[in-house]
Every structure is written in structure tokens, then in C-alpha cells.
């Protein structure tokens, strides 16, 4: 796999990452449904005519909105962690989340976000479910799944053989590299941060903002000390 051949596709502030492997293309997250035309155009511009696999870092609508569409278009498989399954099948981003911390994190926007989710036409069931510690090499992607709950119960990170770490919404880098402020379970999130520090990460690819270096990641953890 050429795991340095990564294209970032932005969807209204949420990232999708297209990875070119020797067996075809893998897409990590699929963006907002409202950006469908732009996503299709970006895939075409990148030469993606054989999307094989969609991997979802978690079930929020800004990360999964085009999954059903892309499966219909390309015949690709969709995989995700089972703990966020109801978010994509029911279209409810608050499914199976701890509501108290979520309400505090969203503040006044909670009522607005409560109404958001997937339209019925965009809801789907994945073709496979991932587990922490699982290798995706049998699917043609040299990466390991790390179950990292906290933002959502089914949040995962993907670490490639080359040290590229796709972290979903565990970190952001809109203005500077930071920990997520939208955490539904702080104990889970703290445990996930501890687990991340044990990984051999070279570059972090966040769900929002630009990729950042191992040094910047270390800086996030040093701020706590």
C-alpha cells in the first residue's frame, strides 16, 4: 500500500480522507449529505473510480452523510464500530450517548443539534463491524483499528503501518491542535487519550482542521502537565 498517498476532502468543515492503496481506494468518513456533489467531484478529481471500502470513525451525520450514496454508486463496503450502529440506522446522533455531558458541551445549540441527523434516504446498515485491535490488512488496508470512545461510544482511530493516525473527532486542528471539546463520556475520553500516547504516531489526521505532526500531538499532552 502507498500509505502516503492521502487526499483530504473537506465537507463544510468536516474531513474525509481518501487513501490510494494497491488494491484500490479507501475513504475514511464521507462528509455531509448536503455536500454530495462536491464529494463526488473531489473523488473524480483524485482519480477515484474504484472505491472499495468506506471506514467510519464514528456515527455523526457530518462524517457519515454520503455513505449510503457511495455504496450505491461504487458497490463499496461500509464498516464502523458497533457501538455507534444506531446513529446511522436511526439517524439519531444522540443515540447511545451520555446525555448530560453532551448537553453541557453543546450548550444552547443542543436543541438545534437534537433535530439534526440523517434523512431516511441516507440511513443505512454497515456491511461490517470493527473491533479494537483489529487489523484491516485482509481488506487491503494496512491499518489497525483502535477503539477510542469518549466523543461517542463507537469512536475509533486508524493507525497505518506508516504512522498515519486518522482520529475522527478525538482531536481537532481548526486554529491549533486541540483535544475535542465535544465529549459525551469524560472517563472514556481520558482512557482513550492515555491509550493514544502509547501509539507510534507520525502524523494525525483529525476530523476537523488540517493534519498535524507528532510534535504537535505531544504538545497537546504536555499542556496537561
Image (cartoon, rainbow, N blue to C red):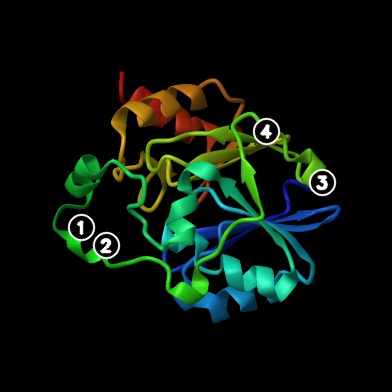
Q: Of circles 4 and 3, which is in front?
A: 4
**Tag 3–tag 1 contact (CB < 8 Å):** no
Residue that numbered label 1 is attached to: 110
Residue that numbered label 3 is attached to: 1
Q: Is residue 209 visible?
A: no
Give the residue at the far right of this rendering. 22
Helix, strand or loop at label 1? It is helix
Q: Of circles 2 and 3, which is in front?
A: 2
In the rendering, which numbered label is found on residue 84?
Answer: none
Q: CA distance from mark 4 to mark 2?
A: 32 Å
- Please rate how many residues cluster around mark 1, counting C-alpha atoms within 10 Å: few if below 14, some from 14 to 19, many from 20: some
Helix, strand or loop at label 2? It is helix
In the rendering, which numbered label is found on residue 134?
Answer: 4
Question: In terms of depth relative to the viewer, which is nearer, 54 or 12?
Answer: 54
Label 2 or label 3, whichever comes before in sequence order: 3
Give the residue at the far bottom of this rendering. 37
Amino acid at each position: 500500500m502507498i500509505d502516503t498517498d492521502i487526499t483530504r476532502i473537506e465537507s463544510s468543515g468536516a474531513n474525509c480522507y481518501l487513501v490510494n492503496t494497491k488494491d484500490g481506494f479507501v475513504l475514511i468518513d464521507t462528509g455531509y449529505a448536503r455536500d454530495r456533489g462536491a464529494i463526488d467531484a473531489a473523488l473524480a478529481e483524485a482519480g477515484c473510480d474504484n472505491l472499495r471500502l468506506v471506514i467510519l470513525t464514528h456515527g455523526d451525520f457530518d462524517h457519515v452523510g454520503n455513505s449510503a450514496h457511495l455504496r450505491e454508486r461504487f458497490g463499496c463496503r461500509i464498516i464502523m464500530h458497533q457501538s455507534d450502529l444506531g446513529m446511522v440506522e436511526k439517524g439519531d446522533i444522540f443515540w447511545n450517548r451520555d446525555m448530560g455531558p453532551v448537553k453541557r458541551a453543546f450548550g444552547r445549540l443542543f436543541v438545534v443539534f437534537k433535530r439534526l441527523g440523517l434523512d431516511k434516504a441516507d440511513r443505512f446498515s454497515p456491511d461490517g463491524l470493527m473491533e479494537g485491535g483489529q487489523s484491516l490488512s485482509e481488506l487491503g488496508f494496512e491499518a489497525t483499528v483502535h477503539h477510542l470512545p469518549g466523543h461517542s461510544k463507537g469512536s475509533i482511530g486508524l493507525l497505518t503501518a506508516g504512522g498515519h493516525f486518522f482520529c475522527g473527532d478525538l482531536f481537532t486542528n481548526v486554529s491549533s491542535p486541540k483535544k475535542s471539546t465535544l465529549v459525551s463520556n469524560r472517563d472514556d475520553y481520558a482512557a482513550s487519550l492515555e491509550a493514544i500516547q502509547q501509539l507510534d504516531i507520525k502524523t494525525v489526521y483529525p476530523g476537523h482542521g488540517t493534519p498535524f505532526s507528532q510534535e504537535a500531538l505531544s504538545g497537546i499532552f504536555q499542556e496537561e502537565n
